[in-house]
Image (cartoon, grey):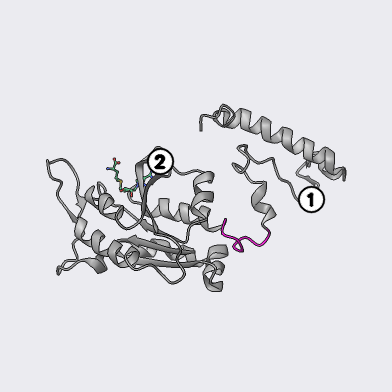
């Protein structure tokens, strides 16, 4: 998979050289590039924002650098691409990002993320982007961040770990929270007793059927207590 990220703070993404995603990049499973939006400005000050039409507080990201960036990254499909890119703009006004969104996006050939700042990006950029690919406005949750970078970091990590070969043991992905609509069961490791706290005896029984039943009950109980909206199908 190819991922392009456009931001005015590219160094936010230095962390993506670490851990499993860093290894995936080194091995070529994930072809990830981070671009500075200011490289597509034409003035001495490398300006990316201006005052909003109609008045109001804050600044709006100008359309011209975004147009050039998207033309460059989406206009010429990369080698091996089977489809138009999916162009994702993180936004608190977008659809909420879920595990199912990550699963869906992990099947794509080419993702482009455009990180907004200030009051956001000139609306015409989204219309223009739709000429080049499928546009998605995606929210990390119902709160407002200063910029799209942290949201894109979270999305790239959630999507990236679902790409075959990124996580060593694919079975570890199957039993996780949200994969089957429930939260994961509690996990324990050695020692069996720590500060007078014992691991639930069933986990030491060696009875795999009974352990599976216990884990399922724990999943249901946790979900009922912490996230009843998941059981009601509201999420
Ligand atoms: N004025 C915008 C609004 O009210 O919808 C918020 C702009 S916010 C200060 C600046 C940028 O941060 C947004 O363009 C978006 O890229 C990012 N952002 C903020 N909150 C976000 C969230 N919950 N999910 C995804 N991106 C977010």
Mark 1 and mark 2 lie on one chain; the one further toward the N terminus is 2
Residue at the spot 38% in from the left edge and 39% down from the top edge: 143
- 129 lies left or right of 168: left
**Magenta stretch?**
162-169
The image position of residue 10, as x and y in percent, is 36, 64
Q: Quadrant of residue 215?
A: top right
Closer to the camera, 11 or 64?
64
Q: Secondary structure at mark 1?
A: loop
Instruction: Tell me the residue that label 2 is attached to.
Output: 95
Label 2 environment density (alpha carbons within 10 Å; few <14, some 14–19, many ≥20): some
Which residue sits at x=34%, y=55%?
115
Residue ID at (56%, 64%): 19
Q: Where does the image place residue 181, in percent across and percent down from the top left?
A: 60, 37
* Disc 2 secondary structure class: strand
Name the residue carrying label 1: 191
Q: How many marks?
A: 2
| Residue 43 visible here | yes
Q: What secondary structure do most residues of the magenta stretch adopt? A: loop
The quarter of the picture where residue 170 lies is bottom right
């Amino acid at each position: 998979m190819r991922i392009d990220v456009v931001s005015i703070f590219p160094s936010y993404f230095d962390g993506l050289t670490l851990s499993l995603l860093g290894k995936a990049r080194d091995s070529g499973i994930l072809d990830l590039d981070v671009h500075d939006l200011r490289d597509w400005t034409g003035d001495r000050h490398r300006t990316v924002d201006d005052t909003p039409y109609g008045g109001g507080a804050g600044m709006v990201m100008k359309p011209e650098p975004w147009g050039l960036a998207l033309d460059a990254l989406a206009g010429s499909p990369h080698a091996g691409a089977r489809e138009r890119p999916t162009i994702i703009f993180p936004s608190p006004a977008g659809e909420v990002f879920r595990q199912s969104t990550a699963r869906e996006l992990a099947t794509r050939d080419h993702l482009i993320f455009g990180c907004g700042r200030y009051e956001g990006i000139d609306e015409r950029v989204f219309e223009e982007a739709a000429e080049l690919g499928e546009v998605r406005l995606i929210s990390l949750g119902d709160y407002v961040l200063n910029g799209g970078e942290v949201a894109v970091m979270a999305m790239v990590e959630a999507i990236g770990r679902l790409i075959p070969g990124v996580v060593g043991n694919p079975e570890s992905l199957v039993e996780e929270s949200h994969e089957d609509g429930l939260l994961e069961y509690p996990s324990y490791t050695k020692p069996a007793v720590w500060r007078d706290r014992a691991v639930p005896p069933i986990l030491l029984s060696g009875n795999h059927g009974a352990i599976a039943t216990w884990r399922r009950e724990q999943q249901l109980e946790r979900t009922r207590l912490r996230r009843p909206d998941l059981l009601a199908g509201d999420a």
